[in-house]
Structure formats: C-alpha cells, structure tokens
Image (spheres, rainbow, N blue to C red):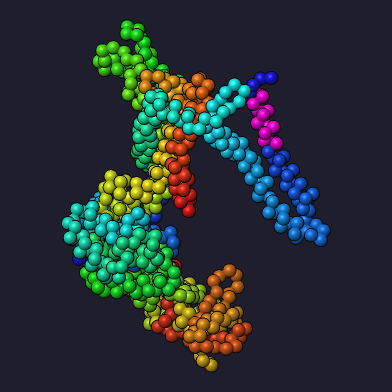
Amino acid sequence: MHPAIQAVLTVGIAVIAAIGYFYLSNLLLDRVLFPARGKNAGRNINRANMIRPWIFLFPALFALGLYLAYPVIETIRLSLTDRVPGGYEWAGVDNYVQMTGDPKFWEALRNNFFWLLVVPGLSTLFGLIIAQLTDRLKWGSVAKSIIFMPMAISFVGASVIFKLVYDYRPAGEEQIGILNAVYLALGGSEPQAWLTIPGLNSFLLMVVLIWIQTGFAMVILSAALRGIPEETIEAAIVDGANPFQIFFKIKVPQIMPTIMVVWTTITILVLKIFDIVFAMTNGQWGTQVLANYMYDKLFRSNDWGVGSASAMVIMLLVLPILIWNVRQARKEMR
Amino acid sequence: MAELKLTNVGKTYGGKVEVLKDINLDIKTGELIVFVGPSGCGKSTLLRMIAGLEKITAGTLEIDGFKVNDVPPSERGIAMVFQSYALYPHMTVYDNMSFALKIAKKSKEEIDEAVRRAAGILQLDNLLDRLPKELSGGQRQRVAIGRAIVRDPKVYLFDEPLSNLDAALRVATRIEIAQLKEAMPNSTMIYVTHDQVEAMTLADKIVVLADKGIAQVGSPLDLYETPDNEFVAQFIGSPSMNLLPGKISGTGARTEVDITGHGTAYSDIATQDADKGRDVKAGIRPEDFRIAEEGEDYILHATVDYVERLGEVTLLYFVPEGDADPLIAKLPGIHQGLRGEIVRLTADPSKVHLFANGQSLRR
C-alpha cells in the first residue's frame, strides 16, 4: 500500500476510534451503568455526571502517564543504576560524578548557557520590533506571514537550509554557500569553514533558531500589541509623547507579561535544543549542548547511566522556568 | 484663555463617507460647551478633531486665532478626558498624572507641585501610590481629570466622561465637574454627551448635532423654550415634545391651528395671511398641557390609554391609530381614575410651538 494512503487510513481510523470511544463510553454510562430511568433515575443522573468528566479526561491522563510520567521515573532510575549483563545494579551518584568529570559536559553546559543568553532575547526583541513595525502597514500581514513561515519548517529542515548557507568549498572552487560568497565579495581573503570556527560556530547555530523563533514571538506579541486599549495610546499622544516614548513607556510595559511568557517559552525550547546542533555539527568544534550530549551518551556510547543523568540535569534546569511560565500564562488569562 | 473658531469644518472618511460638514462654531473663553446628539451623529468625532486625534478634512479650526489644523495634539494646548478614562495601567496615579509633564521635561519640583495641587483639588492625595486597577470607577475618572488639570491646558475636552459610571456616581461626578468649572473660570471646556440631563445642567451653551451638522446652538433654556426645528424640539426635554399635525386656520399675532382629528390650538407665534391653510405641526411639551375647563377651547380630545403616576407628576398616554408615537401629557400632582376616560387638554398659547417642514415658524 502507498505510504500516503496508509497515513490517511491511520488518521481516519484514529478519528473514528476517538469518536467511537467518547460515544460508546457515554452510552455505556448512561444506558447500562446508571440509566436515567426507574426509581433511582435522579441518583443515577448525578452519579453519571460525576463520572463523565473522567471519561473525557482518561485519554489525556493515560497518554500523559505513559509518555511523560513513566519516562521521568524511568530516567531517574536509570541515572542511579549501571547496566550490567543480564540486568541493572545500583550505582548511587556514580553516574553524576562521572559526568561532572567529563570536560565535554561542562562545554555543553557552558554552550547551553550562551544559547540561553542569546536566543530568547534576540528572538523576542526581533519579534517585538517586527510586530510593531508591521502593525499599521497595509502589507503588514503579508510581511508577518513570510516571517512566520520558518515556524512551519522542522529544525532539521532549517538546519539543512543553513548548512547550505554556511557551506564551504576549498579556495578556487565556486562557493555555493551564500555566507562565503558574500564574505569573498566583500573582500574576504579566502573561504572559511564557518562551522569549524570555535565560538563563532555556536553563534551561527543560534542564528538558525532565532530565524525560526522570531516568527513565533512576532505573532504572539503582535496580538498583544493589538490588545492594548487604543485610548491609552491616544492619551499619550495628547500628553505629547513621541512614537518612541509611546512604544517604550506605554506599549511595552503594558505587554510586559506577554513578553515574559514569550521569552520563557523560547528559553525552555533553548534548554532542550538538540536537532540543530545534531544536524549541523553534532557537537564538534566546541558546539556541544546538553541534549546532544545526552544523545551521544545514551545512543552512541550506550552509557545509559550518564545519559540519563544529563537528561535529569536538563529537566532540573527547565523545570523552574516552566513552572514560572505556566503561572504567568494563567495570570494573563485572568 | 482660549477661543475656538470652527469654520466650515467637515470630516470625510476615505474620501467617501461624510460624517460631518459645514460646522461653524465660535467658542468663547471660559465657556462650557456641550455637544449633544443621538449616537452616531459625529459629536465624538468633532471633539477628536478639535483634539487633533482625527484629521480635519475640510475647513479650519483656530485656537486663539491660530490655525491649528496641522498642529499635533500636544501643542494645541488641549487636554482630553476619555470615556474609558484611558489611564496607563502600569503606572501609579502619581505617574499617570505626571507623565505629560515628564515628557515635556519639566523640573522635578515643578512636576511635584502640579501633581500635588491637582490631587488636592480632586481629593486624590491618599491615592497617589495606587495603580489604576486598585481604584473605583469614580476615582479613576478623577485621576483622568487630574491628568488633564496638571497640564494646565487652555481647553479641556471631555468625551462622555460619565457614561462608564453608575447612576449615583454620575450625579456626584457631574456636580464635581460643575464645581471644577467654577474654580477655573478662564478654562474653556468642551463636553460631549448623549445624556441631555448632563447637557442641560452643565452647559453654558449646547450644540445639538444631527444629520452631519449643527441643528441648533444656544443656552440650555433657549433650546428648551425656542427650539429651531423639530429635531431639537424632540431631542431636548423628557418626555419629548408632542407634535400634532394640523392646518393653519387663522393668522396674525396669534395663530390658530386646526389639529387634525382634534380641536384647535392657539400659538403666540405670528403668521402672515399667506400662511393660511398651510400644513404645520403644533409642538406642545407634555408638561405644558393642562385639562381644559368646561366650555374652553381644547387642543386634544382623546381617551387616556394608560397612566403613569410618579407622585410629583402624572403622565397620561394617548396612543394614536397607526404606528405613531403616543402623545403624552404630564400633569402636576396625582390624578386618579383617568384611565379609559376621555379628556380634553389645552395649553397656553405662549407654549405652543409651530413647525413647518421641520423648521420652526418662530422668527
């Protein structure tokens, strides 16, 4: 069977199964378990209504348990044990000690920190500027659509695009990478293998994520800017504020909570960054990050202990920001 | 100290939709002018054009003799109080009030003095550190007014400032605005409202806007006593004026009108012989009706369809055939047992208005 037909079929079956689940489970509840007739009709309706929310919650709870809660517990277990032939043995914090002795781990941690400093900040900043600049333009929505498009590209796809941008051919050959082409056209002496230059290469990887995430920041912030009461801006105009003062003193403070939500959302994403590094440098030349380090250990070195330990480090770093983010988003909704 | 002069001012959106045309208006220093009109008549647009928030597409606006059509709002010497207060939600009351002065780069001492003085006038002294969300509606409105006062503008613009307040607070704030005006006799104020009670109580002069233009300008009592046209006659006063169609049957200093289907009305509005037989409408305010005495000429002869007793007055409703508005008479005091009765009503000739083609026959 053609894979596309297979996919459509799968989707179709899943949709039917989902509808069937809700329909049949409610039917079972209302007709068989607690029928709304007989002398206990009233009591049965109440009981059915107490159970009904759980019918709707069950699929989500089940999936969360299977794919989220169970892996966390399993990862904790793996990080505290060593794999030995035929089973596991308790290792205590040995894996963590081993990990902190690895210079690659510290490189990854340091790089993650730089990603954290650069990417969320610049994405949010660019998103905010673009949102403001396109707000009143006639072709603003076209511009926004184009800037939003990278969001639809997978990280690996984006990495392939940027690998071509940064491509290196030995001197004398025609450069197909636009960066080298521009570099040479501007008077650079010889083509550079950009992704092997320590320090700069990490930054070049960050550019990929900024390129993708600016669209996300822009869309959210653009909606927030639209939500600012027009009269407060008019009041500021009457008060004599110039456009910059209106932007920085009236608009930005009013959407600060949204800016923080965008910033933290991207921060969480950055802490987990893996695909771009994996696809472009695989952590070589000093570009290692925590997630790729974890992948290296888990699936290349088959060292499940250290791999799981680094996974725990990532989770511990993400958790506080995640909690803060969720709280902030809830506050927004009120 | 500010005089405003509007000459042939008009507003057209996108070159097509005309909302205002040929507005001519002189506003003198220290006047409190109220723009009233039904919703959608362009009163807020006119105010926003004076503020500079909407472009004036035709005519000229002068403040103190200078054409300000293209002067930005902050340099026109105006301050505006918005319907939704438009307080900056992230700033304290103090910062809200001082924002304009900070933008104008005034010294700290100057700003502080201006804010404290305005806060004193408006009794906001204890609230200066609060955020707008911690204030009640009335307090927010006072902060919005305070924000205008600190700038010491030549012209205050109020855009339906009371419409977001509840009824009790509205009355209280209305009185506060009246007192504020008295305390600042040299400030010119322009006030937009759709509430005629606000207009009648606050205004030195009312501008009634209708159908893209000015229907009438005058003092509140002028508009009440001598409306220029049917629109103003019905817009000012509550319940609105009754309009009874009829024909002029006698002319001279006292005009006689045969009311279609009813009796005869006499009006002190003079008419010429040529007017005889002309179709007119006699306008009589509900409160000007009285029950005709035995043998006296009557204007209205009809069955009372229902009665509203408000204590101080009694309202009698006469529902005419067809879908015309009911005629209403407002009699002082309490009257019992009038429902279903046939009554004859008359009015003093000095209180009977005459309109032909929508315009008053009074010259």
Give me the residue at 61% from left, 86% from top: B341
Q: How many marks?
A: 0
Of residue A82 and residue A118, the one placed in the foreground of this image is A82
Q: Quadrant of residue A290?
A: top left
Residue B328 appearing in the image: yes
Residue B231, percent across and down? 43, 68
Is residue A110 shown above or below B140? above
Is residue B246 shown above or below A331? below
Give left or right: position of B248 versus A69. left
Residue A251, percent across and down? 34, 48
Residue A123 appearing in the image: no
Q: Residue furthest top?
A: A172
Q: Is A315 part of what is drawn in magenta? A: no
Q: Is A10 part of what is drawn in magenta? A: yes
Q: Quadrant of residue A122?
A: top left
Secondary structure predominantly adopted by residues drawn in magenta: helix
Q: Quadrant of the C terminus of chain B?
A: bottom left
Q: Quadrant of residue A88?
A: top right
Q: Residue furthest bottom?
A: B294
Of residue B239 and residue A325, the one placed in the foreground of this image is A325
Of residue A166 and residue A185, the one placed in the foreground of this image is A166
Of residue B186 and residue A207, the one placed in the foreground of this image is A207
Give me the residue at 39% from left, 55% from top: B19
Q: Quadrant of the N terminus of chain B?
A: bottom left
Residue B81, percent across and down? 33, 61
Q: Which residues are magenta?
A: A5-17
Is residue B146 shown above or below A177? below
Give me the residue at 45% from left, 78% from top: B285
Give left or right: position of B74 versus B255. left
Give me the residue at 57% from left, 81% from top: B307
Residue A271, percent across and down? 43, 33
